[in-house]
Each structure stands twice: as structure tokens, then as C-alpha cells.
Image: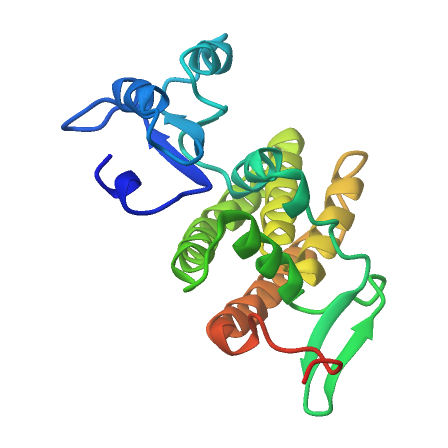
Amino acid sequence: LELLNHAQFDVILMDIQMPVMEGIETTLRIRRNADLPRQPRIIALTAHAFQGERERYIALGMDDYIPKPIEIETLMETLRRCAPDSQMLERPRRARVQSGDGEADVPLDQPPIIDWRVLEEYATLVGDTDGTITRELIDLYLSSTPSLFERLQAAVQNNNSSEAVRAVHDLGSTSASIGGLRLSKHARALERQLRYERPSDVHERIDELQAMFQAVQAELADWQTHMFAPTSGDG
């Protein structure tokens, strides 16, 4: 609350259960503060995903709601809904890649390991000027993805096709959310096959996905040198 007196925020992720002041009371105080030049968008965060929770929090003055544990795809979509119309960026149809000769356009049928404009879009949506929030998104993706592979391998081992589909779907979605288009494309291709039959080379396909994830890890380790790089048309 004290920070709002000195700085403007576009979006606040409001934890409903905080130790000093609960999220609902904090939200009500923000909404009653007539001295703010403009009201921020407030997104509720809670581990209690009961039916009707979103409507309840909106009625209490919040703009949206995300259940815990936070999924990257859900967070990205919620932030897009909360962005002002002027900041709503169309997802790029062609991927920009960094090379020794400058920038090049790569058709999406040959996706790069990382489409950096996806992360730039995210940084723009959340007003991340120093990379702190983007770093948190990347860390969340890198720490949660190994468990998706564990789920996928266990489901295949146990012939649980529905769980295998869910795991590889989550892998494709979360990878796309951080710009991992190559991994996302191959994960979704495997997902489509698993919906109808178990491919004979499923274990080899999973190994390929893991190798692609290792490539994503290597690219993201150097993310700060890629983000916000000037295009060839810039001075």
C-alpha cells in the first residue's frame, strides 16, 4: 500500500492469504484510495479453486483470478486479458532469431528454439523494464518442466494414455508460453498421435523432446543478451 503512494503499477498479483493483511482487505483499501491517479488491475491468487471463486473476487473489486499452483499458460492469458487495449500485442506469425548476420525471419513450419518476441510481449504486458518478472517466468518454466517429463514417462510406462496426453499437452502449452516453439510443435505433434494410438517410437520421441528442452535451457541461460535486441532497421 505504501508503494502505491510513490509509484504506479499496471497489474498487481494479489495473494489472498498474506501474513499481515489479507488480499481482500488490501484490495478494498486500494479501491477506496481516491488519491491514486489510476487504479491498477488486481488479479487474485489463491490455492482454493472453488466454483464461483472468480465471480466472488471480481465482486470484491478484483479484475481476475488465478488458482494456485500457477500455470504459465494461465498466467499469460490472464495478463493479456488485463492489458489495456493499446498494449494488446498480436502474437507474431513469424519468429525472429538472432544470428551472426543480424536478424532473420523464420517460417513457423521451421520454428526456432526460442522466439524471443514471445518473452518481449510478456515483458511489455507486465511492464517489466529490468527483467525481474521475466526472470521469474523463466525460472518457473525451467523448474516445472522436468516434472512434466516425469509425468509423461510414467504415463507411457503404465499405458495411461489420457495422462500421457495431458502431460505432453501441458509441455507444449508451457513451452509455447515462453517462446519455445520448436519443443512446443513437436510436443503437440506427439499429443495428436497419443490421442488415437501409442506410436511405436514413443520412447524415442520423448528422448527427442528432452533433447529439445536441453536446447531451450541453453538458450534461456543467455536470455538477457537476446531480449529487446534492436532490429536491423533500428539505428
Residue 170 sits above or below residue 121 on the image? above
Residue 70 sits above or below residue 109 on the image? above
Residue that sits furthest to the left in the current view? 20
Q: Position of residue 94 (x, y in %)?
A: 81, 63
Q: Is residue 156 left or right of residue 58?
A: right
Identify the residue at horizontal 32%, vertical 18% (top origin): 28
Identify the residue at horizontal 57%, vertical 44% (top origin): 152
User: Quarter of the image containing the N terminus?
Assistant: top left
Residue 122 sits above or below residue 117 on the image? above
Rendering quarter of residue 162: top right
Q: Position of residue 120 (x, y in %)?
A: 59, 61
Q: Is residue 199 visible?
A: yes
- The colouring scheme, among rainbow, by chain, secondary structure or one colour, is rainbow
Front residue of 31/56: it is 31
Front residue of 175/211: it is 175
Identify the residue at horizontal 79%, vertical 37% (top origin): 197
Front residue of 182/77: it is 77
Q: Is residue 208 visible?
A: no
Rendering quarter of residue 47: top left
Q: Position of residue 42 (x, y in %)?
A: 43, 29
**How many marks do you count on the picture?**
0
